[in-house]
Image: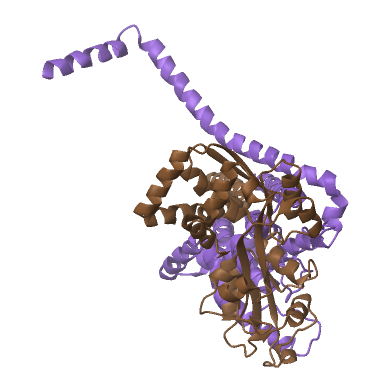
Chain colours: A purple, B brown
Amino acid sequence: MKNKKEEKAMPVSSTIHGGMNHKAADKVEKIAHGIFITCAFVAVLAVVSISLYMIINGVPAIFKVGLKEILFSTVWKPTATEPSFGIAYVILTSIVGTFAAILIGVPIGVGTAVFLTEIANKKVAAIITPAVELLAGIPSVVYGLLGLLILNPLMYKLEMYLFKDSPTHIFTGGANLISAVLVLAIMILPTVISISSSALRAVPASLKNASLAVGATKIQTITKVLLPAAKSGIVTAIILGIGRAIGEAMAISLVSGSVVNIPLPFNSVRFLTTAIVSEMSYSQGTHRQVLFTIGLVLFVFIMIINLSLNKILKKGGKVER
Amino acid sequence: MMISKFMKKAAVMACCVALIGGVLTGCGKSDDSKDANNSNTGNPGVTNEPTKSEDNKQEDNKQEDKKLSGTITLIGSTSMEKLSNAVAEDFMNKNGNVTVTPEFVGSGAGIEAVLNGTADIGNSSRNLKDAEKEAGAVENIVAIDGIAVVLDKSNTVTNLTKDQLIGIYTGTIRNWSELGGNDQPIVVIGREAGSGTRGAFEEILKVEDQCVYANELDNTGAVMAKVASTAGAIGYVSLDVVDDSVIVADLDGVAATAENIKAGNYFLSRPFVMATKGEISEQSELIQAFFEYMKSEDGKAIIEAVGLITVD
């Protein structure tokens, strides 16, 4: 056995130290190079194929129904004998819902980040930080379920109180825009908190020290020095929050009621994402193609968000330098 | 610098993830629901296997002795997709040389296909029209689809007339007090456009595209859960999924039971027809064997497994 091992070992060592070594090393280099290139291309390929797929599937309905009809008509009756595919309310709901969620979520998120990085002592931070991380890890369907079980009944009570004598209000049982916005606001918190925390931490200590040295209070330092210095990071946090909110489907499909309506607080509403999710399984023909067009609209929204993010990041980098 | 560079990278990465994630959730979900459908249609076959007794195996052998082979084309109703796929799968499992291809284009198109010979069987989720019968289509009812109207437990109204139901779903009746119940707003819950249950419900009540829904939910379970948890809610579901969490309303004084539906007294039901051109006895051996199978215990098990009522 021992001899055999040595025999086996011999040729290997000879290749390493012998004349073959350059070629072998080149081969390994080349193979590794190839492997890494392939890995890199998987991501690029995914982005390119998703983009192509969305465009190929989303465009036919635009020609069939008409872009104006899809984007600006407010009537969504995809299975009627004379079908109508207007998603104006759906687009409006996504914009209004996301904007409202940002309005609620960002102040809370930035406040939490300021508290964590500047005010909280280590013990408190040690409790809050893992809690925020855990919040990020909770599956969206759980948010949806909690919204369904806790938020919707509360909203229903409020709705019955507010619209007691209204002859025209359609009672939704609490599945409305507010429920969806609240769920979204909580869901974007972890993103906003973690990114604005790291932005605040990246502010040079000299700035803070200088501010404190000239007699500014802690709160003055935070509002007048730290937050402005971390501005680009916080804007990044907001944009990523928008990205998260506009792309969320599962949680809000459970709490929003999913009827195509003008996005008023107590209306049951449908978002771009839930419009695709709720009708994809049984749709056919033009109806299905229009669902892909909705996907394309969502895709364009997310592209715009990403492009503006890139721009802001570049700008922020220049300012720092 | 290092930190800000890292931050940028992290932000760009997160951004890519958000992008891909955002797009994939849409596709992913649709895959899920397809999977769910597949598993639904797959289930009957699977659940059927363990119950296969010796007798059934002998039947299988008999069928193998006949050595059926060929292709059966089922074209028609989208509502019959679940049933057609389930029977097609099971029939092909039992007869290795037979291919059953179901297509779902709508009841009318299905009958047309069987009449002009492009399909062996035309699926229709309504009774055949006189004109279709005159053209030679024969109405073979294989199953009945029943829809239950469900109310939340606190509701004191337990019987609804057809007109009341239409009024509620078109938005002219908005409070249970108008129907002799509590002063409680009605929360109208339905299914999404394209759902077979919604199609059947609106078709039977003749309220297609006039319904004013407060919630459009994308599966039966969600409708049941929402109705059970919302005071004043009303919803419709397939008859087979109702349970104790809700009240099943009587319609025109008739309880929603399989017996009443078979007797034709319960109006919220529709036949599932597999139409043939000419009587079954005039069809090929293969088609006759298919209809024999539909009437057999195995066929009935499949029909019940997809939530339908068998006919005798």
Quadrant location of the C terminus of chain A in the rendered image: top right
Task: Report whether residue A128 is seen.
Answer: yes
Nearest the camera: A134 or A147? A147
Does residue A150 sit above or below B95 in this rendering? below
Locate residue A33 relative to residue A157 in the image: left or right: left
In the figure, residue A200 lies in which quadrant? bottom right
**Residue that protrudes farthest toward the top in the picture:** A19
Does residue A139 sit above or below A168 in this rendering? above
Q: How many marks?
A: 0
In the figure, residue A51 lies in which quadrant? top right
Locate residue B234 relative to residue A261 in the image: left or right: left
Nearest the camera: A178 or A80? A80
In the figure, residue A257 lies in which quadrant? bottom right
**Residue A152 location (% of width, % of height):** 61, 77
Does residue A192 sit above or below A153 in this rendering? above
| Point 67% across, 61% down: residue | B195
| Point 75% across, 76% down: residue | B169
Quadrant location of the N terminus of chain A in the rendered image: top left
Nearest the camera: A281 or B128? B128
**Residue B285 location (% of width, % of height):** 57, 42
**Residue B310 location (% of width, % of height):** 56, 64
**Residue A102 location (% of width, % of height):** 67, 65
**Residue that protrudes farthest toward the left in the picture:** A2
Locate residue A143 relative to residue A175 in the image: left or right: left
Task: Report whether residue A213 is seen.
Answer: no
| Point 57% across, 79% down: residue | B229
